[in-house]
Amino acid sequence: MKRRRIFTSKRNRRKTIIIAVVSAIILCLSFLIFIRFSPVSFKEVIPDVPEQPSGTEGVSEPPVRYKRLETEIGDREQIINILEVNLRSPEVDIRPILALDEIHGYETTSSMVQRRGAYAGINGSFFDIYGQPMGMVVIDNQILTSPQGYPVFGITSDHTAFLSEIEMKVYLDTGNKKIGINALNRLSQRGKTSILTRDFGTTTRLSRDALNLVIGNGVIEKVVRSSRPVSIPKGYNVLVSTGKSVEYFTQLKSGMKAKLLTLTSPIKSIINAVECGPWVVRNGREAVPLNDPWTGPLNTREPRTAVGLTHDSKVLLVTVDGRQPGKSIGLNGKELAEFLIGLGVNNAALLDGGGSTTMCVDGEVVNIPSFQGRERKVGNALGIFMERKSAP
């Protein structure tokens, strides 16, 4: 009996130790999971806005919420800023802003937002040399530049947001035939054609051999073969043809009828829009490519800017700070997609990131830009415009 009691006692102690060890492991794992996915710090700001009319759908929700999240994702510190926009509120809108209000130009995000009187905003889409947008831009129902096959974020005439790829075709109608044009207000590669309007600037900005057709009043006013920039008169368009395409357009002469036709699909009645970079989330699932011509590799942790649409039709404008050890490392594409899906995002796409990533709210830059410790000048921004309560 004594030996049995000793054996039983040892076995009980062993069970107790095992239970204690397992409990400690579970507790540690739970703590780590909590640290990994729970916010270290959270801040939310709701701006003052006019009271909405009775019966307005979404009246119980504010038009804009600003949220700041300091957390850990991927075992790294992250600072994430979120602007949640409820477009069911009639007094809020989202519109692109061009740097210096021109297709070509550079300006900081905060300067654009303040200059145009927006409540808040983020840096916009990718831009090329001289700040020219690389994709589609629509402002106040006017198509300024043509799309390039990436998802386009925009607002329609019924005040709803969309995120969709848009096909746009531009033709020159000479009466006898319709001739396809490759781009609107963007100089194409050699062998391609572009239509440049006065929105592009006062000249074609092209310093290589090109055939230029100056078109206005429904006719070809002038044909200019030049290797220097050609003037774009007010009220006129210039068709620029280079490389092999020049031979095709030499058949067109001064005085011939010419009219521009523009067709877009599938979205109708676009009021404001800007073309994004690649998809991050599509139909509720991760859709991030491993690499992209505009963004580069997406498996590295970088500062990110994204726009997303939630299941309940809200717009999320999101910035993730990066390249700042001890503060915020940044997210790779997969991590960003998982984070956005966790917020209820159904579709999302990247905007320009890296040193361009910037968010400002109510006159203040709220993130930490990674470009030499200050804001980088960019080609465009997305602004949130809103009426305010008048001071008592």
Image (cartoon, rainbow, N blue to C red):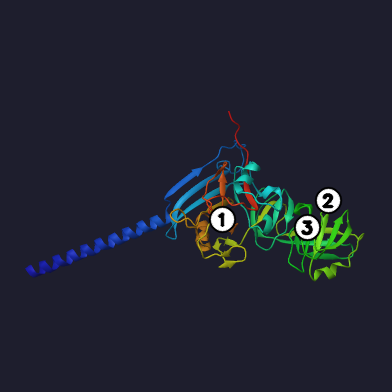
Residue underneath mark 1? 355
| Residue 6 screen position, x and y as percent | 11, 67
**Label 1 or label 3, whichever comes before in sequence order:** 3
Tell me the kind of residue under disc 3: Thr
**SS for dot 3:** loop
Whether residues under marks 1 and 2 lie with C-beta atoms below 8 angstroms apart, the answer is no
Left or right: residue 187 compared with residue 33: right
Quadrant of the image containing the N terminus: bottom left
Left or right: residue 106 compared with residue 259: left
Residue underneath mark 2? 235
Seen from the viewer's position, the closer of residues 183 and 198 is: 198
C-alpha separation, residue under disc 2 versus residue under disc 3:
15 Å
| Residue 19 screen position, x and y as percent | 25, 62
Whether residues under marks 1 and 3 lie with C-beta atoms below 8 angstroms apart, the answer is no
**SS for dot 2:** loop
| Residue at position x 61%, y 48% in the image | 109
| Residue at position x 76%, y 53% in the image | 201
C-alpha separation, residue under disc 1 versus residue under disc 3:
29 Å
Other residues around mark 3 within 10 Å, as few (<14) / some (14–19) / many (≥20): many
**Label 2 or label 3, whichever comes before in sequence order:** 3
Q: Residue 7 falls in which quadrant of the image? A: bottom left
User: Residue 204 bears which disc, if any?
Assistant: 3
**Outermost residue to the left:** 2
